[in-house]
Amino acid sequence: TFELLRDWPEPMRRGVKLMDWAPLQAWIDSGATLGNPGLEAEVARSGNSVLKLTLEWSKAVNRTIAGMVAGVPPFPFFRESAEKLARSADIICVSATPGEALEREWREHDIARYAAVIAGQEMGSKKEHLKLTAGGKYGKDSVLMIGDAPGDLAAARANGALFFPINPGQEEASWQRFCHEGIDRFFNQTFAGDYEASLLAEFEKLLPEKPPWK
């Protein structure tokens, strides 16, 4: 994000000054588990001001979100999809969101009962979650990840899993399609191949690799 902002002509013309994010990039590249617990440990070890500011920002974001999401129900067709999946599949929730927030939100709306595991950022990356819970336990084309970001797709691919995208700005339509079409294809083994490829092509058009100013 900082690199893209640095290359964006409009804010640069206005004199926006960016901090030196090299310490943050170095921590990200170190292989450490990304999340507040790991960041807190690194701040305590190094005392780095950039990492300290990043941690303060992250905690502020979590507090803001906690105040926003109360009473906000899941997207339409999520619950119907979970009920349909639960009849024949094992379900886990993997997220970069703090575990406390995940547990609170899923229990508030009585959807935690669908998931065997609710894994937040403290438990590792999405890639690690999938490997630990599904690796070597299911047959070919029998693991499916649902996600809304390129990182979700990358985690799925790293574990040989299929992927159903929730398209940004089209979340309700995506969940409806998954409920009425995607789940059946997953269970009858016709998800892989042309069907998945068409979903991913649509998804990638909505998430271009480069911003408009590049």
Image (cartoon, rainbow, N blue to C red):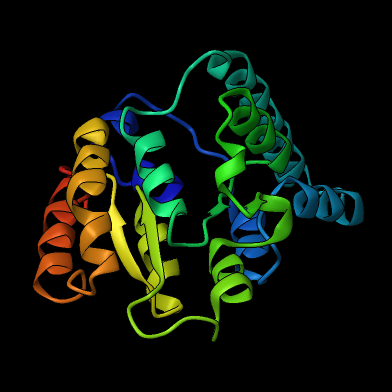
Residue at horizontal 67 percent and vertical 33 percent from the top: 101
Q: Please tell me which residue lies in front, 138 or 41.
A: 138
User: Where 73 sits versus 212, above or below?
Assistant: above
- Seen at 61% across and 19% down, the residue is 64
Report the front residue among 60 and 43: 60
Indicate the position of residue 28 as horizontal and vertical percent values: 62, 61
Say if 160 sits above or below 69 in the image. below
Relative image position of residue 127 (x, y in whole percent):
53, 69
Q: Is residue 26 left or right of residue 72?
A: right
Left or right of 212, for residue 125:
right
Name the residue nearer the viewer: 153 or 61: 153
Residue most toward the front? 87
Position in image of residue 154 (x %, y %): 39, 68
Residue 61, how many percent across, how many down?
61, 27
Q: Residue at x 20, y 69 (%)?
A: 191
Which residue is pictured at 44% across the width and 54% down the height? 87
**In-image side of 73 versus 213 (left or right):** right
Q: Is residue 181 visible?
A: yes
